[in-house]
Image (spheres, rainbow, N blue to C red):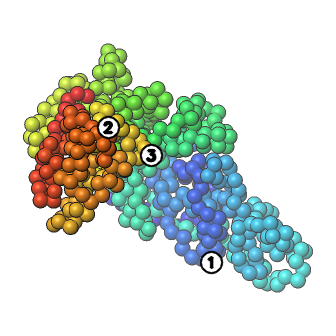
Amino acid sequence: MAKYEVKQTAVSQVLADVRSDKIAIPELQRPFVWKTWQVRDLLDSLYNGYPVGYLITWQSVGAKLKGGEVAAHQQILIDGQQRVTALRAAIAGQPVVGTRYQKKRIAISFNPLTEEFATQTPAIRKSSLWIHDISEFYSGTSQLTFLRSYFEKNPDADQHKVEESVTKLAAIEHAQVGVISLADDLDVETVAEIFVRINAKGVPLSSADFVMSKIATYGDEGRNLRKLIDYFCHLAVAGHAFSDIKENDEEFAATEHLNKIQWLRNQSDELFQPEYTDVIRITGLVGFNRGKAGAIVSELSGLDPETRRIDESRIPDAYERFGHALDQLVSKTHLERFVMMIKSAGFIDSSMIGSKNALNFAYALYLLLRQDAEMTEGQRSRIIKRWFVLTLLSGRAVGSFESTWETDLRRIRESGAERYLEILEESVLGEGFWNVALPQELNTPSRRNPAFQTYLAARVNSGGRGFLSKSISVAQMIEGHGDLHHIVPKNHLIQNGFPKQGDYNQVANFALTETPINIAIKDRPPKEYMAWISEQIATGQFRLGEITNQEDLKANLAENAIPEFIGDVTATNYQEFLEARRKMMAALVRRYYEAL
């Protein structure tokens, strides 16, 4: 069975189909990213008969059209949005959405004598030799009437040349564009694969793009849900854009959705700034207990899981569930409480969270646990924090994580969240993990390693101080963008048999240290600079940091998971030091996790 069909369609027919909603362009409410010269070049290519690439559409079942009617099959434009939007702007005179969400016109001018397209300028507007706005030419009366007017203004113009150019200009509406229509019974993954193979640029289209496209086909309701996702993600990063959205998108501002996200205009937290892919995943988990984009599209398409057939009567309920889940996700109360939980676990900066997926599932789980009226917020907090850290340490958010999520949710429904978490801990975080696997995970030069970032979170959670600091905490250093420094200096190691970056940059050789302390240490090994500390304790004269008490020094080393034989460490016993410290770091992480 054919997965798609290819046909040639006139530009005018494509624009007519978009105007009548037979072809949906999901990107219409997003800022138009093309430059005006790209619009100009597109018109020039069509004028000269050059190919402009294929448009790719995908059929959607049960879409709402203008006027409220339901289409048996509506085409969703999944590749070619910018080209079609450019044609709508230049030929049909339709406004585009600017970067501040305001509607603006892109006027393209044409000179019949030079056959040149250009972005309209004040100088062009003053010249009678130019067609100032080609959209007016296409919407005007007859070609003959236009030529008569043009020659009246330009009596000396080469009439044959102008007539020939204007005829070619008019023919742009009839230029043929290739349209590849993908079958409606293809799953999202197959559509994505076909897209990549057909697309000459080789640009991948994420599964979430298809979900966003699907949402946008459900009439005004679907378009506003999609806008809610887009605007939420935008405001989470740039809250100042709220006034632009309110002022320039009157349709959305008139709905109840704008009020749901207005709180973002005054928030500046950077810990959780989801992209629309993240929002789709979280909403799918909360609304449908489904993690895969294809499954979400199936739900929104009315696919009956038992018969595997489309049942359009299921569609309204699916959108209602999706919308309700989305409302929970964008809630100020819910998101702020969730972020507070993650921060209380020690993850106070977004740089400490290498896995956005771990954060996504934890938030989805928090929203689902809120539906349990008998569970206290304290119980939820404990489950969420431990689940999040377990996910990071065990790598459950990599690979086929979406299937893992769906399995987790099914077992949570069967056993309860607390009991299933205990089962996971018993199977994933046993003695072998803490004593063997975790120390081995810390045998890496990657500072982004989840085990190392969890170690830093454990340090923050305990309120621990920086290495050799008397009072400055690790949290203060991270929030102030403090530096990680080598405990055994890099140059000392390079000069003494460890020239490779993977050797001297081991995470077990890093500690958050005040910059003045690091500068004072310079290239000296611990055996030398720790002797200074001993002298400092004996005399009270500051030389390195401000610690002047032996017990305080011992406590500081323990806080930083540094072996007590640090005072004897040089390049000679560097490997022994690393091995001992990895075990201490792992033990510190274990104590932290068990206390969450």
Mark 3 burial class by Cα count in 10 Å: few <14, some 14-19, many 20+: some
Please tell me whether mark 3 or mark 2 is closer to you in this view.
2
Check disc 1 and report its element: helix, strand or loop: loop
Q: Name the residue nearer the viewer: 596 or 466.
A: 466
Could you tell whether 234 is left or right of 1 in the image? right
Query: Crowdedness of circle 1 by 10 Å Cα count: few (<14), some, many (20+)?
Result: few
Q: Position of residue 307 (x, y in %)?
A: 30, 37
- Label 3 SS: loop
Residue beneath the point at 49% across and 51% down: 76
Q: Residue at image x 64%, y 52%? A: 98
Q: Earlier in the sequence, mark 3 or mark 1?
A: 1
Helix, strand or loop at label 2? It is: loop
Q: Can you identify the residue that label 2 sits on?
A: 470
Amino acid identity at mark 2: Lys
Task: Please state the horizontal and vertical placement of residue 5, each as a whole percent of the image.
Answer: 43, 62
The structure residue drawn at horizontal position 81% and vertical position 70%, both measured from the top left corner, is 123
Image quarter of the C terminus: top left
How many marks overall? 3
Q: Which residue is mark 3?
A: 275
- Give percent across and percent down for residue 299: 38, 38
Residue under pointer 1: 48
Cα–Cα span, label 3 and label 1: 40 Å
Left or right, 158 with reference to 399: right
Looking at the rendered image, the disc whose residue lies closer to the viewer, 2 or 1, is 2
Q: Residue furthest front?
A: 539
User: Looking at the image, which residue is at 16% across and 30% down?
Assistant: 423
Measured along the vertical axis of the image, is residue 105 above or below residue 461? below
